[in-house]
Amino acid sequence: MELDDVALRLEALGNPTRLRIIRVLVRAGEGGLPVGRLQERIGIAASTLTHHCGKLIQVGLVTQERRSTMLICRANYPMIRDVADSLMDQCCAEADEAGPQP
């Protein structure tokens, strides 16, 4: 994943409300949550939830699916894993160059 793409997603997660949304959706599992239930769990106004979900959808961390009259939000697990992996993909790559730590 390109550095700019990772930065956009991390920027979105830098907002406490959006981070709470992601955490609730991750705990909900693959089935996700209806928007109304997500709103209850987060405890914010519907318009605020719409705004924050929109940002998370825009950067690919959340998906939405309409089922009849219900709107289901889901964490995009592959994208979340890609972001986490990109933070760790260079782990310890220069450890030998740094030499012993005092």
Image (cartoon, rainbow, N blue to C red):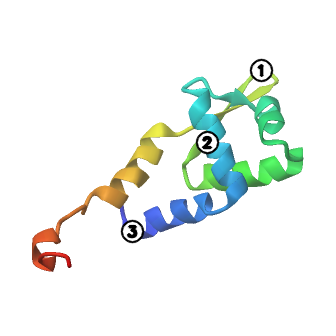
Instruction: Using a 10 Å C-alpha cutoff, classify the residue at mark 3 as few (fewer than 14 neighbours), some (14 to 19) or many (20 or more).
Output: few
- Amino acid marked by disc 3: Leu
Q: Is residue 3 left or right of residue 43?
A: left
12 vs 69: above or below: below
Q: What is the three-letter code of the residue carrying label 2? A: Arg
**Which residue in the protein does label 2 denote?**
23
Q: Secondary structure at mark 3?
A: helix
Q: Secondary structure at mark 2?
A: helix
CB contact under 8 Å: marks 3 and 1: no
Q: Which residue is at 56% across, 55% downward?
A: 59
Between the residue at mark 2 and the residue at mark 3, the CA separation in whole angstroms equals 23 Å
Residue 68: x percent and y percent? 77, 20
> Which of the two discs, 2 and 3, sits closer to the camera?
2
Sequence order check: which comes first, mark 2 or mark 1? 2
Q: Nearer the viewer, residue 59 or 84?
A: 84
Q: Which mark is residue 68?
A: 1
For marks 2 and 3, the one nearer the N-term is 3
Whether residue 17 sits left or right of residue 43 in the image: it is: left
As displayed, is residue 30 above or below residue 49? above
Q: Earlier in the sequence, mark 3 or mark 1?
A: 3
| Quadrant of the snapshot with the C terminus | bottom left
Disc 3: which residue: 3
Q: Residue at x 60, y 43 (%)?
A: 62
Label 1: state its secondary structure: loop
* Number of marks in picture: 3
Task: Give the x, y percent position of residue 33.
Answer: 69, 28
Label 3 to label 1: alpha-carbon separation:
38 Å
